[in-house]
Image: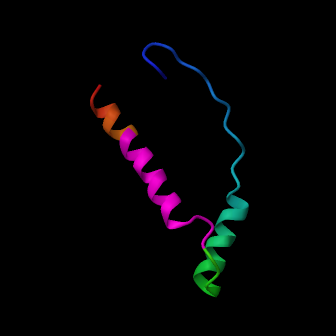
Amino acid sequence: MRGDDVESVPSEPGRWNHFYPAVERALRLGEPPPVGGGDAVAALEVLDALRSSKSAI
C-alpha cells in the first residue's frame, strides 16, 4: 500500500509440512534450522516496522 493505492498480491501456499519437521530435526538431531538466525531477525524487523507504522495511523 502506498498512500491511497492498494495492490493485491496473491500469497503462495504455505510449506508448513516441510518447515515443522525440519524444526524437529534441528532440535532432536542437531541439523541446521530451516531458517537462519539472520533471516529470522530480518523477518521480525519487518513485522516490527509494520506494527510501528500501524500505530502511527
Residue 16 against residue 50 in the figure, above or below: below
Q: In which quarter of the image is the C terminus?
A: top left
Q: Residue at x 44, y 45 (%)?
A: 46
Q: Give percent across and percent down for residue 50.
A: 40, 38
Q: Is residue 43 magenta?
A: yes
Most common secondary structure along the magenta stretch: helix
Q: Residue at x 34, y 32 (%)?
A: 54
Q: In which quarter of the image is residue 51?
A: top left
Would you say 46 lies left or right of 33 here? Answer: left
- Colour setting: rainbow
The residue sitting at the left extreme is 56
Q: Give percent across and percent down for residue 32.
A: 62, 76
Q: Residue at x 66, y 63 (%)?
A: 19
The residue sitting at the top extreme is 4
Which stretch is magenta?
Answer: 33-49
Q: Does the magenta stretch include residue 39?
A: yes
The residue sitting at the bottom extreme is 29
Would you say 10 lies left or right of 44 here? Answer: right
Would you say 45 lies left or right of 19 here? Answer: left
Q: Give percent across and percent down for residue 21.
A: 69, 71
Q: Residue at x 37, y 46 (%)?
A: 48
Q: Give percent across and percent down for residue 33.
A: 60, 72
Number of dots carrying numbers: 0
